[in-house]
Every structure is written in C-alpha cells, then in structure tokens.
Amino acid sequence: MSSADSDIYQHAKTSSLVYNNGTVLWVPPTKYEATCKLDMRLWPFDRQNCKVVVGSWTHHVGQVNLQLERDWREDYMTQNDEWYLLKVDEERNARKYACCTEEYADITYTLTIQRRPETYKTLILTPALGNNHINFIILSPLFI
C-alpha cells in the first residue's frame, strides 16, 4: 500500500490546527490503494481474501497507539461496482523490533470480497452458452 500515486491530493486545500504552544497539526488528504493476489480459478464467481496492514514505522505506541474499530460499518467503504464486501476481520499487533526498545503497533485488516458476476454472466457466459446451443442444433444432424 502506498500513497505515492496520490500526489494530486498532497496539494489540496486543507486546514491545519495551530495550538497555543506552537504545535501545528496538519493532516494531508491522501488516497491509499491496495492490491491483492487473486485466485482466479472460479472466475467470475470468485471470492478473495485480501490483507491490508496499517501501521507507523516512525511512531511507537507511546506516540501513536492504534486501536481496533469496535463499531465497524460498511458505510466506511466506498461502493464498488465489481466486488461485494462480505466480511472485514481486524487484528491489532504490537511488537518490538531489533532496532528499538519501544513497541510499534499495526492493524491487519482481512477483507473477504466476492466478485459481482452479473456483468460477466450477461456479456460472456450467456453468449457462450447460446453459441454452444446453436452449434449443437447445427451439428446434431451430422451425428444422427
């Protein structure tokens, strides 16, 4: 997952919070995209499990303590025309690395998605089945 392709969002008009101690909080908007290794054996009726890990490489749990979202809602997601979101599992991990004494947290999201096969049925399977029926009708007298 990377925000490298979302440089158009880095320069968008955003607000900052300036505190009386001089601290400035600026959260630049960004768009993350993740790719999954797909198992296409049952295409277009396939179901996929995709893992996305979100964490900080630069802030330990004393600075950024990621927590699970107990009230997960599907309306957090953008509607997709190709996939149904069936399930979201989440797991919080905290570990120490050889470089550092502090723990670093991440959350692993496992998304179970299923392809919406309607378009593929209409555009590919229905004509293919129709073609098979026509071939059977045309060629069946040859075998009688």
Image: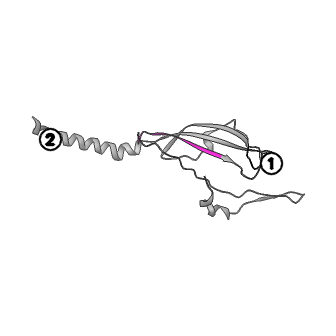
- The mark found on residue 63 in the picture is 1
Q: Amino acid at mark 2?
A: Leu
Between 98 and 80, the residue placed more toward the observer is: 98
| Horizontal and vertical percent position of residue 7 | 63, 63
Vertical placement of residue 17 versus 136, above or below:
below
Q: Is residue 35 left or right of residue 122?
A: right
- Place residue 121 in its image quadrant: top left
Q: Which mark is residue 23?
A: none
Residue at image x 43%, y 43%?
40
Q: Quadrant of residue 17?
A: bottom right
Tell me where the magenta segment starts and ends, as one range: 43-53
Name the residue at the front extreme. 98
Tags 2 and 1 touching, CB below 8 Å? no
- Residue 135 % position (x, y): 19, 43
Left or right: residue 134 versus residue 25 is left
Which labelled disc corresponds to residue 139?
Answer: 2
Q: Disc 2 versus disc 1: distance between alpha carbons? A: 73 Å
Magenta stretch secondary structure, dominant? strand
Could you say where residue 96 lies in the image, as x and y percent from the top left?
75, 43
